[in-house]
Amino acid sequence: MNNRLLQKWHDREKSLGIWSNLPDIHVAEMLARTGADWICFDLQHGLMDYTDLTRLLPAVTGTPLTPLVRVAANQPDQIGKALDAGARGVIVPMVNTADDARQAVTSCYYPPAGQRSCGPMRDAMLEGFSYLGTANDEVACLLMIETQEGLKNLAAIAAVKGVSGLFVGPMDLCYGLGLAPGDFSNERFTGALKAILTTCESNGLACGMFGYDASLAAKALDDGFDFASIGSDVSFVREGVSQAFAVARGEERSSSSRGGY
Protein backbone atom coordinates (compact mmCIF):
# COMPACT_ATOMS: atom_id res chain seq x y z
CA MET A 1 0.00 0.00 0.00
CA ASN A 2 1.49 3.35 -1.09
CA ASN A 3 -0.70 5.40 1.24
CA ARG A 4 1.30 5.01 4.44
CA LEU A 5 -1.40 6.66 6.52
CA LEU A 6 -3.99 4.09 5.46
CA GLN A 7 -1.46 1.38 6.24
CA LYS A 8 -0.93 2.80 9.74
CA TRP A 9 -4.65 2.78 10.39
CA HIS A 10 -4.90 -0.76 9.07
CA ASP A 11 -2.12 -1.78 11.47
CA ARG A 12 -3.79 0.14 14.33
CA GLU A 13 -0.81 2.48 14.65
CA LYS A 14 -1.22 6.04 15.90
CA SER A 15 -0.11 8.90 13.68
CA LEU A 16 0.67 12.58 14.10
CA GLY A 17 0.41 15.26 11.47
CA ILE A 18 0.71 18.94 10.66
CA TRP A 19 -1.93 21.41 9.54
CA SER A 20 -0.97 23.80 6.75
CA ASN A 21 -2.71 27.16 6.26
CA LEU A 22 0.02 29.08 4.44
CA PRO A 23 0.53 28.84 0.67
CA ASP A 24 4.32 28.69 0.83
CA ILE A 25 6.02 25.76 -0.87
CA HIS A 26 9.24 26.23 1.12
CA VAL A 27 7.41 26.00 4.44
CA ALA A 28 5.50 22.95 3.20
CA GLU A 29 8.70 21.25 2.02
CA MET A 30 10.42 21.97 5.34
CA LEU A 31 7.49 20.65 7.39
CA ALA A 32 7.34 17.51 5.24
CA ARG A 33 10.83 16.62 6.45
CA THR A 34 10.18 16.93 10.19
CA GLY A 35 8.98 13.35 10.74
CA ALA A 36 5.24 14.01 10.43
CA ASP A 37 3.08 11.12 9.27
CA TRP A 38 0.79 13.42 7.29
CA ILE A 39 0.15 17.02 6.36
CA CYS A 40 -3.23 18.57 5.62
CA PHE A 41 -3.51 21.54 3.28
CA ASP A 42 -6.58 23.51 4.30
CA LEU A 43 -8.68 24.86 1.44
CA GLN A 44 -11.62 25.57 3.75
CA HIS A 45 -10.03 28.06 6.15
CA GLY A 46 -6.39 28.21 5.10
CA LEU A 47 -4.96 31.16 3.18
CA MET A 48 -4.63 29.11 0.01
CA ASP A 49 -6.61 28.08 -3.03
CA TYR A 50 -6.46 25.38 -5.70
CA THR A 51 -3.67 27.15 -7.62
CA ASP A 52 -1.55 27.05 -4.48
CA LEU A 53 -2.37 23.37 -4.06
CA THR A 54 -0.83 22.57 -7.44
CA ARG A 55 2.50 23.81 -6.04
CA LEU A 56 2.20 22.64 -2.44
CA LEU A 57 1.50 18.99 -3.24
CA PRO A 58 4.55 18.63 -5.53
CA ALA A 59 6.64 20.27 -2.81
CA VAL A 60 6.00 17.32 -0.48
CA THR A 61 6.23 14.60 -3.15
CA GLY A 62 8.95 12.08 -2.40
CA THR A 63 8.76 12.55 1.36
CA PRO A 64 7.42 9.82 3.65
CA LEU A 65 4.33 11.69 4.79
CA THR A 66 0.84 11.39 3.32
CA PRO A 67 -0.66 14.59 1.86
CA LEU A 68 -4.28 15.30 2.72
CA VAL A 69 -6.51 18.21 1.71
CA ARG A 70 -9.45 19.64 3.60
CA VAL A 71 -11.75 20.71 0.82
CA ALA A 72 -13.91 23.82 1.14
CA ALA A 73 -17.17 21.94 0.67
CA ASN A 74 -18.66 18.51 0.03
CA GLN A 75 -18.79 18.93 -3.72
CA PRO A 76 -17.60 16.53 -6.46
CA ASP A 77 -15.52 19.14 -8.26
CA GLN A 78 -13.73 20.24 -5.08
CA ILE A 79 -12.94 16.68 -4.03
CA GLY A 80 -12.02 15.46 -7.51
CA LYS A 81 -9.65 18.34 -8.25
CA ALA A 82 -7.85 17.91 -4.91
CA LEU A 83 -7.29 14.22 -5.66
CA ASP A 84 -6.32 14.93 -9.26
CA ALA A 85 -3.70 17.39 -7.98
CA GLY A 86 -2.07 14.58 -5.97
CA ALA A 87 -3.78 14.46 -2.57
CA ARG A 88 -3.93 10.98 -1.06
CA GLY A 89 -7.05 11.78 0.91
CA VAL A 90 -9.61 14.46 1.64
CA ILE A 91 -11.18 15.77 4.81
CA VAL A 92 -14.76 16.77 4.02
CA PRO A 93 -16.45 19.36 6.27
CA MET A 94 -20.06 19.58 7.46
CA VAL A 95 -21.15 15.99 6.93
CA ASN A 96 -24.53 15.77 8.64
CA THR A 97 -26.35 12.84 7.06
CA ALA A 98 -25.77 9.49 5.42
CA ASP A 99 -26.60 11.15 2.09
CA ASP A 100 -23.80 13.67 2.72
CA ALA A 101 -21.46 10.77 3.44
CA ARG A 102 -22.49 8.95 0.26
CA GLN A 103 -21.89 12.10 -1.78
CA ALA A 104 -18.36 12.41 -0.39
CA VAL A 105 -17.62 8.73 -1.01
CA THR A 106 -19.01 8.91 -4.54
CA SER A 107 -16.72 11.86 -5.27
CA CYS A 108 -13.61 10.10 -3.90
CA TYR A 109 -13.70 6.81 -5.80
CA TYR A 110 -13.73 5.72 -9.41
CA PRO A 111 -16.53 3.39 -10.63
CA PRO A 112 -17.84 1.02 -9.54
CA ALA A 113 -17.16 2.21 -5.97
CA GLY A 114 -18.04 5.82 -6.84
CA GLN A 115 -18.40 8.31 -9.64
CA ARG A 116 -15.11 10.19 -9.56
CA SER A 117 -14.42 11.60 -13.00
CA CYS A 118 -11.26 10.31 -14.66
CA GLY A 119 -8.47 12.88 -14.96
CA PRO A 120 -5.70 12.16 -12.43
CA MET A 121 -3.35 14.87 -13.65
CA ARG A 122 -0.58 14.72 -11.06
CA ASP A 123 -0.62 10.97 -10.54
CA ALA A 124 -0.83 10.24 -14.27
CA MET A 125 2.30 12.37 -14.76
CA LEU A 126 4.18 10.41 -12.10
CA GLU A 127 2.79 6.90 -12.47
CA GLY A 128 1.00 6.79 -15.79
CA PHE A 129 -2.48 5.38 -15.98
CA SER A 130 -1.52 2.41 -13.85
CA TYR A 131 -2.66 4.75 -11.05
CA LEU A 132 -6.25 4.03 -12.04
CA GLY A 133 -5.91 0.38 -11.07
CA THR A 134 -4.96 1.17 -7.47
CA ALA A 135 -6.48 4.61 -6.81
CA ASN A 136 -9.57 3.38 -4.98
CA ASP A 137 -7.37 1.48 -2.52
CA GLU A 138 -5.09 4.47 -1.91
CA VAL A 139 -7.57 7.27 -1.20
CA ALA A 140 -8.68 8.22 2.32
CA CYS A 141 -12.21 9.62 2.61
CA LEU A 142 -12.48 11.41 5.97
CA LEU A 143 -15.69 13.06 7.13
CA MET A 144 -16.03 15.85 9.68
CA ILE A 145 -18.65 15.53 12.41
CA GLU A 146 -19.28 19.02 13.75
CA THR A 147 -23.02 19.50 14.29
CA GLN A 148 -25.85 18.10 16.39
CA GLU A 149 -27.39 16.72 13.21
CA GLY A 150 -24.16 14.93 12.38
CA LEU A 151 -24.06 13.42 15.87
CA LYS A 152 -27.70 12.33 15.58
CA ASN A 153 -26.90 10.54 12.32
CA LEU A 154 -23.51 9.25 13.46
CA ALA A 155 -24.27 5.55 13.09
CA ALA A 156 -25.76 5.97 9.61
CA ILE A 157 -22.83 8.13 8.44
CA ALA A 158 -20.23 5.66 9.71
CA ALA A 159 -22.03 2.74 8.06
CA VAL A 160 -21.65 4.18 4.54
CA LYS A 161 -19.30 1.94 2.57
CA GLY A 162 -16.14 3.71 1.51
CA VAL A 163 -15.78 6.02 4.50
CA SER A 164 -12.21 5.75 5.83
CA GLY A 165 -12.67 7.67 9.05
CA LEU A 166 -14.29 10.50 10.97
CA PHE A 167 -12.60 13.75 11.95
CA VAL A 168 -13.32 16.24 14.73
CA GLY A 169 -12.64 19.96 14.76
CA PRO A 170 -13.07 20.77 18.47
CA MET A 171 -14.10 24.41 18.08
CA ASP A 172 -16.62 23.62 15.36
CA LEU A 173 -18.04 20.82 17.48
CA CYS A 174 -18.45 23.26 20.40
CA TYR A 175 -20.34 25.65 18.15
CA GLY A 176 -22.41 22.79 16.77
CA LEU A 177 -23.42 21.77 20.29
CA GLY A 178 -24.34 25.34 21.23
CA LEU A 179 -21.38 25.61 23.64
CA ALA A 180 -18.98 28.45 24.14
CA PRO A 181 -15.89 28.01 21.95
CA GLY A 182 -13.24 26.14 23.91
CA ASP A 183 -15.64 24.64 26.46
CA PHE A 184 -13.88 21.31 26.06
CA SER A 185 -14.61 20.05 29.57
CA ASN A 186 -18.38 20.31 29.11
CA GLU A 187 -20.09 16.93 29.49
CA ARG A 188 -21.95 17.38 26.22
CA PHE A 189 -18.65 17.88 24.39
CA THR A 190 -16.86 14.96 26.05
CA GLY A 191 -19.94 12.80 25.52
CA ALA A 192 -19.94 13.66 21.81
CA LEU A 193 -16.27 12.69 21.53
CA LYS A 194 -16.95 9.38 23.22
CA ALA A 195 -19.84 8.68 20.85
CA ILE A 196 -17.66 9.42 17.83
CA LEU A 197 -14.83 7.23 19.11
CA THR A 198 -17.19 4.35 19.92
CA THR A 199 -18.85 4.59 16.51
CA CYS A 200 -15.51 4.54 14.71
CA GLU A 201 -14.36 1.54 16.66
CA SER A 202 -17.60 -0.33 15.96
CA ASN A 203 -17.30 0.33 12.23
CA GLY A 204 -13.56 -0.18 11.84
CA LEU A 205 -12.94 3.47 10.98
CA ALA A 206 -10.02 5.72 11.84
CA CYS A 207 -10.83 8.61 14.17
CA GLY A 208 -8.99 11.92 13.92
CA MET A 209 -8.75 15.16 15.88
CA PHE A 210 -7.59 18.64 14.98
CA GLY A 211 -5.04 19.32 17.73
CA TYR A 212 -4.13 22.94 18.33
CA ASP A 213 -0.78 22.01 19.85
CA ALA A 214 1.31 18.99 20.77
CA SER A 215 -0.17 18.52 24.25
CA LEU A 216 -3.69 18.40 22.87
CA ALA A 217 -2.58 15.96 20.17
CA ALA A 218 -1.07 13.73 22.84
CA LYS A 219 -4.30 13.85 24.85
CA ALA A 220 -6.34 12.95 21.79
CA LEU A 221 -4.20 9.88 21.11
CA ASP A 222 -4.33 8.89 24.78
CA ASP A 223 -8.13 9.16 24.66
CA GLY A 224 -8.31 6.73 21.76
CA PHE A 225 -8.04 8.85 18.62
CA ASP A 226 -5.95 7.29 15.86
CA PHE A 227 -4.49 10.49 14.44
CA ALA A 228 -4.19 14.14 15.38
CA SER A 229 -2.40 17.29 14.27
CA ILE A 230 0.27 18.74 16.56
CA GLY A 231 -0.39 22.29 15.36
CA SER A 232 -0.30 24.41 12.22
CA ASP A 233 2.39 26.27 10.32
CA VAL A 234 0.86 29.50 11.64
CA SER A 235 0.94 28.34 15.26
CA PHE A 236 4.53 27.09 14.92
CA VAL A 237 5.69 30.50 13.71
CA ARG A 238 3.71 32.38 16.36
CA GLU A 239 4.83 30.15 19.24
CA GLY A 240 8.43 30.06 18.04
CA VAL A 241 8.67 33.84 17.84
CA SER A 242 6.98 34.27 21.23
CA GLN A 243 9.38 31.79 22.83
CA ALA A 244 12.39 33.46 21.25
CA PHE A 245 11.36 36.88 22.59
CA ALA A 246 10.65 35.43 26.04
CA VAL A 247 14.08 33.82 26.18
CA ALA A 248 15.84 36.93 24.87
CA ARG A 249 14.09 39.13 27.43
CA GLY A 250 14.76 36.75 30.28
CA GLU A 251 11.05 36.20 30.80
CA GLU A 252 9.45 32.95 31.85
CA ARG A 253 7.33 31.57 29.07
CA SER A 254 3.71 31.18 30.08
CA SER A 255 2.08 27.78 29.61
CA SER A 256 -0.88 27.23 27.30
CA SER A 257 -4.14 28.39 28.82
CA ARG A 258 -6.20 25.82 26.98
CA GLY A 259 -7.65 22.96 28.90
CA GLY A 260 -8.80 19.61 27.53
CA TYR A 261 -9.08 19.89 23.77
Image (cartoon, grey):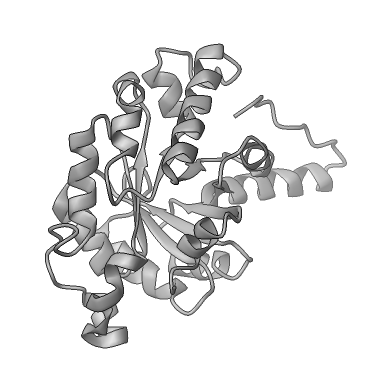
Front-lying residue, 245 or 45: 45
Direction right: furthest residue: 250
Residue 200 higher or lower than 128, as above or below: above
| Residue 12 falls left or right of residue 116 | right
- The residue that appears at 18% across and 36% down in the rendered structure is 99
Residue 154: percent from the left, percent from the top?
A: 35, 29
Quick one: quadrant of the N terminus?
bottom left
Direction front: furthest residue: 202
Note whether residue 78 is visible. Answer: no
Residue 153: percent from the left, percent from the top?
A: 30, 25
- The residue that appears at 15% across and 72% down in the rendered structure is 119
Quick one: quadrant of the C terminus?
top right
Front-lying residue, 108 or 18: 108
| Residue 138 falls left or right of residue 199 | left
Residue 54: percent from the left, percent from the top?
A: 30, 69
Note whether residue 53 is visible. Answer: yes
| Residue 204 falls left or right of residue 244 | left
- The residue that appears at 56% across and 13% down in the rendered structure is 186
Residue 103 higher or lower than 4, as above or below: above
Residue 197 higher or lower than 239, as above or below: above
What number of labels is visible? 0
- Quarter holding residue 225: top right
- The residue that appears at 40% across and 58% down in the rendered structure is 68
Front-lying residue, 33 or 207: 207
Residue 224: percent from the left, percent from the top?
A: 60, 38
- Quarter holding residue 249: top right
Front-lying residue, 161 or 185: 161
